[in-house]
Amino acid sequence: MAQQKSLHQRPIQNPFTNPFSSSPLSNSSLSNRPISLLSRNGLLLLLALLVILGVFLPWAGSPLFPFPNTISSSSSHSKWRDYSLAQAVEFVAKNGTVIVCAVSYPYLPFLNNWLISVSRQNHQDKVLVIAEDYATLDKVNERWPGHAVLIPPALDSQTAHKFGSQGFFNFTSRRPQHLLQILELGYSVMYNDVDMVWLQDPFKYLEGRHDAYFEDDMTAIKPLDHSHDLPPPGKKGRPYICSCMIFLRPTSGAKLLMKKWIEELQDQPWSRAKKANDQPGFNWALMKTAHQVDLFLLPQAAFPTGGLYFKNKTWVKETKGKHVIIHNNYIIGFEKKTKRFRDYGLWLVDEHALESPLGKLE
């Protein structure tokens, strides 16, 4: 009986007893006693924290984890690899219109120069850069998120810029496909090469509601009131229209023109003997669909070819104030194009890079 009594009288163990201590802890002593990192408790807590971090940090990039993990994520640009043309156009389009250019990495300085001139006319927000390689896609979206998209397959940026090469043909021959896709999505689209500079707002010159607008690539001077019809065929049996500045409305006529352009490029592929590019195909398509498509030739004084603007000083003086977009064609090579722009005060990136959405490129 005495043994039973001593059992009942044994003190009840405090539920907060430290398992590594011989003496029980009271509630007050537990809450007021600091835990040293050098104590057994501190070491156990530190170990537990490390285990928790080791388990959960790999999930930091998932949608279930509210804070992105910049250390473990493979690339901050990876999301743009799945960015579709439809998503991109919807993001940048304004009033149903998008401005498009296609760029490979060596042309980034020209892209920046062109963007400065577009920004001065307040149309930069509707620009979509179709990147032809991942380096361009990542660079543009790093500086200007959402304004570049890549339509697979990616091209070799080192060969795509060499005029007359198969890489250049592969680069330019995708143009009508891109434009047709945008038209099929229901948007109007302006295409520009990036070796251009805007001096005025080109949208003011898109008179009427025609299907397609384009500029002449001939250097022969036209009267200021020249016809806006498609010019007659030249010596090669086709007109000589520039495929580097085009505006299209999402009409059946514009879509037909793009489909015919695609067919012409398929019928006249690149070969070593015939180093084709996209422009002859565009001219054949214009001529063959002229009776079905409402075409509009833009005024020469506003949209002169480089072969006229940079070579006829008298004409430039006579038409001063009328120039809208200057195209730096009729010359080949980055260095030569850059020097010509500089000579005419049109290489803007040297002093005005911050006016571009991309800022100053390294």
Image (cartoon, helix red, strand yellow):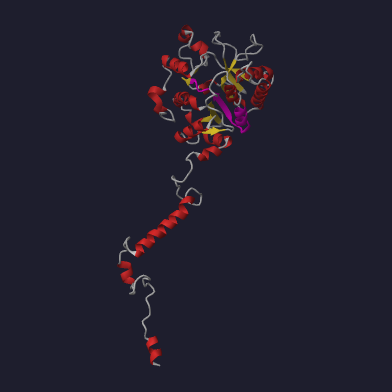
Q: In terms of depth relative to the viewer, which is nearer, 217 or 110?
A: 110
Q: Is residue 35 above or below residue 98?
A: below
Count of numbered circles in the view: 0
Percent from the top left, x then y, of residue 139? 47, 33
Q: In the image, what residue occupies the spot 47% across and 55% down?
A: 55
* 20 on left or right of 59: left
- Quarter of the image with the C terminus in it: top left
* 110 on left or right of 182: left
Q: Given the current orientation, which residue lies at the most extreme top position?
A: 314
Q: Given the current orientation, which residue lies at the most extreme bottom position?
A: 1
State which quadrant residue 81 falls in: top right
* 43 on left or right of 298: left
Q: In terms of depth relative to the viewer, which is nearer, 305 or 135?
A: 135
- Quarter of the image with the N terminus in it: bottom left
Residue 279 lies within the magenta run = no
Q: In terms of depth relative to the viewer, which is nearer, 290 or 194?
A: 194
Percent from the top left, x then y, of residue 87? 56, 37
Residue 179 lies within the magenta run = yes
Percent from the top left, x then y, of residue 242? 57, 17
* 165 on left or right of 47: right
- The magenta segment: 177-196
Q: Is residue 179 above or below residue 229?
A: below
Q: Is residue 67 above or below residue 254?
A: below
Percent from the top left, x then y, of residue 68? 45, 47
Q: Is residue 325 above or below residue 132?
A: above
